[in-house]
Image: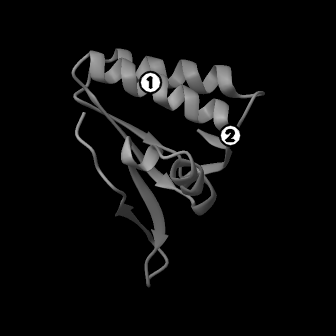
């Protein structure tokens, strides 16, 4: 996913997430590194996808959260619910992922 996750794109976002969960892989990784904006609708879909994953015995991990997206998780208290990994630039200019708080389902 890239760009903005809002009312205009929520349908495609939800379809992609639910399709990923429906594959029944042990861990569903959601890379939001290219997402510029994530609103409450996007968070709601992530919560629904996480519940769906847990019901199927899977984990859902969110990686690449930019500062604004990570702030949305933090302000809503979802950093304690999701395994959210923030994106951080390394000294070489490449990207690495910083682990966020973790909570086992």
User: In the image, which disc is placed on residue 66?
Assistant: none
Residue 61 in the image: state x and y as whole percent: 36, 41
Q: Earlier in the sequence, mark 1 or mark 2?
A: 2
Q: Disc 1 marks which residue?
A: 49
Q: Residue at 76% across / 28% down in the picture?
A: 7
Q: Residue at 39% across / 28% down in the picture?
A: 50
Task: Give the spatial CA distance, label 1 vs label 2.
Answer: 16 Å
Q: Residues within 10 Å of mark 2 (few under 14, many from 20)?
A: some
Q: Is residue 69 left or right of residue 30?
A: right
The local secondary structure at tag 2 comes to loop
Foreground of the two, 55 or 34: 55
Residue 53 in the image: state x and y as whole percent: 33, 22
Q: Is residue 36 left or right of residue 78?
A: right
Q: Disc 2 marks which residue?
A: 39
Q: Residue at 44% across / 24% down in the picture?
A: 49
The quarter of the picture where residue 39 lies is top right
Q: Is residue 50 left or right of residue 43?
A: left
Q: Is residue 29 left or right of residue 25?
A: right
In the rendered view, tell whether residue 104 sits above or below residue 8: below
Quadrant holding the N terminus? top right
């Amino acid at each position: 996913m890239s760009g903005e996750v809002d009312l205009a794109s929520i349908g495609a976002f939800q379809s992609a997430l639910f399709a990923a969960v429906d594959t029944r892989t042990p861990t569903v990784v959601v890379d939001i590194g290219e997402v510029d904006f994530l609103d409450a609708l996007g968070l709601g879909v992530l919560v629904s996808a996480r519940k769906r994953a847990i019901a199927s015995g899977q984990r859902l991990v969110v990686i690449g959260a930019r500062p604004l997206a990570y702030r949305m998780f933090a302000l809503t208290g979802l950093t304690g619910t999701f395994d959210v990994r923030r994106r951080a630039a390394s000294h070489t200019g490449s990207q690495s992922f910083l682990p966020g708080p973790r909570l086992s389902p």
